[in-house]
Image: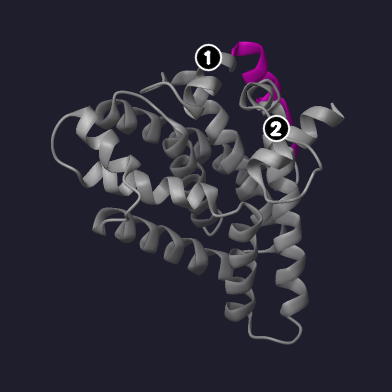
Amino acid sequence: MIKGLKSVLGFLTIIPVGMDFDTEDVAKNVWLFPIVGGFIALIAAVLYNLLGYILPGHVAAGFALFALLILTGFHHLDGLLDFGDGAMCAGSAKNRRNAMHDVNTGVGGFALGFFVLLITYVALVENAFISLIAAEASAKFSMVLGAFVGKASHEGTGSAFTKTVNARLFLLTLFVYLLFLGILPLEKGIMVFIAAIISSLFMTLISSKLFGGVSGDVFGAINEITRMVVLVVLLI
């Protein structure tokens, strides 16, 4: 378990774990995704509360979101930008995948990234300490769900997860995720659970139509969008 946790930490964050991670090994330990998500969200939430004593809440929220993105090495955000570029590209699934792999960020990626981060920030300003933890755990669970139900668009990082995440791993991840939702009131927890599933399935379906399947970039986009959706739902 310790080795698996180090692998997942090394894959999902920039936290130095003192070892190289193997993608297949990470895929075998996806049930730890919600735990790592909750951990980095806890760091950001603590920062939010501490800064809230000396700064206005909306400024503290901005720093908290920035810290969360830094902890993930902007990896998922990069996937969101690539997803936006691919989605806005006309033509075949192959053309769209090529646009995703372009090192330059186009207007589609910029616009999608801007509005997802904007809505996430605004929703975070109005949310409490626990909400950020639940949102990040949901974001990590949603990636595992996408890997479980989706098929790989091509060989790469994403295919390692779609090949490895089976029913047993998914159910174990679901169990861990539900433990995190226990920190919310029952009604809120149910709403968040439904929102995370819908967000992941919708993104997986869209990706299948646009790109012929899911990929590492798609998983990053699922993470960022699900976090936003959950934070918005928690405002209801």
Name the secondary structure under disc 1: helix
> What residue lies at 63% left-to-right and 21% top-to-bottom?
24
Q: Position of residue 78 (x, y in %)?
A: 45, 50
Q: Is residue 119 above or below residue 4?
A: below
In this view of the protein, can residue 181 be seen by the observer?
Answer: no
The residue closer to the viewer here, 93 or 208, is 93
Crowd class of label 2 (few under 14; some 14 to 19; many from 20; radius 10 Å): some
Task: Classify 156 as above or below 12.
Answer: above
Q: Check residue 141 in the rendering and tell me which mark sits there, or answer none.
A: none
* Residue occupying image coordinates x 60% and y 12%: 167
Quarter of image, res 189:
top right
Instruction: From the top left corner, tell me how far across and down residue 136 is, in percent.
Output: 62, 48
Amino acid residing under circle 1? Lys
**Residue that mark 1 sits on:** 163
Q: Residue at x 34, y 41 (%)?
A: 101
Query: Is residue 232 part of the magenta span, yes or no?
Result: no
Q: Quadrant of the N terminus?
A: top right
Residue identifier under label 2? 21
Q: CA distance from mark 1 to mark 2?
A: 18 Å
Q: Earlier in the sequence, mark 1 or mark 2?
A: 2
Magenta residues, start to end:
166-181
Q: Nearer the viewer, residue 188 or 109?
A: 109
Residue 53 horizontal/vertical position (percent)? 76, 83
